[in-house]
Image (cartoon, rainbow, N blue to C red):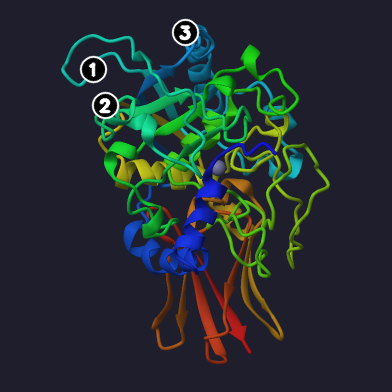
Amino acid sequence: MVEPCGQRELMDQLEKQYPGFKNQMDVDYLKCVNSTFPVTPRKKIIRDTIYYYDTVYTIPVVFHVLYNNAAENINDSLLINQLEVLNRDFRRLNFDTSNTRSFFKSRAGDARIQFQLAKVDPQGNVTTGIIRKATTTTSWGGGGGINNNMKSSSTKGNDPWDPKKYMNIWICDLSSNGNDGLLGFAYPPNGHPSWNANSWVSDPNQGVVLHYKITGRNNPLSNTASLNTSRMGRVAVHEVGHFLGLRHIWADDQGSFNRCSLDDFIDDTPLQGVGSNFNCDQNLNSCIEAKNDLPDMVENYMDYSSHACQNMFTKRQIITMRNAIKHFRKDLPIQVQIIEKARIFDTVVYDQVLVYTVAKDNRLNIEVKNEDIVNNISYEVYNMLGQKIEENHPIISNFTQISTTRYPSATYIVILRNLDGRVVRSQKVVVN
Ligand SMILES: [Zn+2]
């Protein structure tokens, strides 16, 4: 079976090595996320106009092509078109955005992250950003799991360029016994709260590894039965997602009895219990959600669906990746570009936020009826003594549910603020 990315194997390896590893990830995440990712609004509201101060991150890429034969020494054109795929998909300029199903459309976004071949090497010399190196290693995928031998000259690979300043992509033969089982892998940033410490690796091992047959779009070597669902250059998109902190949308808990409770820590991907099976099954709905149930998001680059149906990152995944750059890979972007745009924001639309509780249901519900509000407001909860029960949390999806099991029965006040911190709404709710 084809494994689009080595992450699952890596997680299983780590689970064996550290029993309880996967569950511990959730615990660590909750502990760490608030302190690591303080909410810093990007947008400033002046009167009723929103000004977006936005940054486009451009990441320099260096390709290390390691080859043992001519076929593995893939052509420049594939490397260039691989970069084009990354740029289109991360900027949501891909040709197939119209395939995003209507109920997911508002969740899809432009990551404002782009990639270019490095123009200057670590010594300050002009470079093409492409290194080619012959090696006596015939395959890097065998030997009982994932290894990092391709990342060091001492193990017949090639040393990375400063991983803090370049995104290194090694391209090599990841097959094992002639089987194209492993197509790529990447490690999350060290310290990232969506991952526990056992998944972090030292700097020289940071970067992305791709199987040479699936690098680039329509790589002629991928025209095989086992690789034909991975022909659109999106293994790289998926792996760069991991490199920027994203997890699989089903949280790698397919074998677990509670697979629908473990999450990918991304609120706007539906709960998903299994990964897609390299196809485009749009009827797949592995977890039924109590409210606003949606099918599995086969459109997502972080699923294991066929490339033909992948076409989006969600807005929350984008926030996570951009935060990863800001907090963990801050020296990586070489160029930022400020975009400023403004639009009139009608305060009346705040009426289109419903805040309510339902008797005998231990949840506080915030429903946003107007898409423009999502990501533009936050909520906090106070008791009648004025004590803050919930800290300021951004509202990032149309439907937010807050557990009230720890609230004593009483009346509470939910405050909604715009990104400038102004209160735009206060709403009393009764918790029974
Ligand atoms: Zn993966």
x and y percent of residue 173 in the render? Answer: 51, 24
Q: Residues within 10 Å of mark 1 (few under 14, many from 20)?
A: some
Q: Is residue 323 visible?
A: yes
**Are the residues flagged by discs 3 and 2 in contact, CB closer than 8 Å?**
no
Q: Nearer the viewer, residue 182 or 243?
A: 182
Q: Nearer the viewer, residue 126 or 373?
A: 126
Quadrant holding the C terminus: bottom right
> Mark 3 or mark 2, which has the lower sequence index?
3
2 and 1 marks in contact (CB < 8 Å): yes
- State yes or no: Cβ of the residue under disc 3 lies below 8 Å from any atom of ligand 1: no
Q: Amino acid at mark 1?
A: Asp
Proximity of marks 3 and 1: CB atoms separated by less than 8 Å: no
As drawn, the label of residue 76 is 3
* Label 3: which secondary element: helix
Residue 323: image x %, image y %? 38, 46
Left or right: 153 in relation to 33: left
Quadrant for residue 28, please give it. Answer: bottom left
Secondary structure found at label 2: loop
Instruction: Report whether residue 421 is seen.
Output: no
Please name the residue shown 48% across and 19% down the image: 83
Alpha-carbon distance for marks 3 and 2?
19 Å
Residue bearing the label numbered 2: 161
* Image location (x, y in percent) of residue 138: 48, 23
Left/right placement of residue 235 relative to residue 132 reads right
Sequence-wise first label, 3 or 1? 3
Position of residue 241 measured from the top left corner of the image (x, y, whole percent): 49, 39
Which disc is residue 138 wearing? none
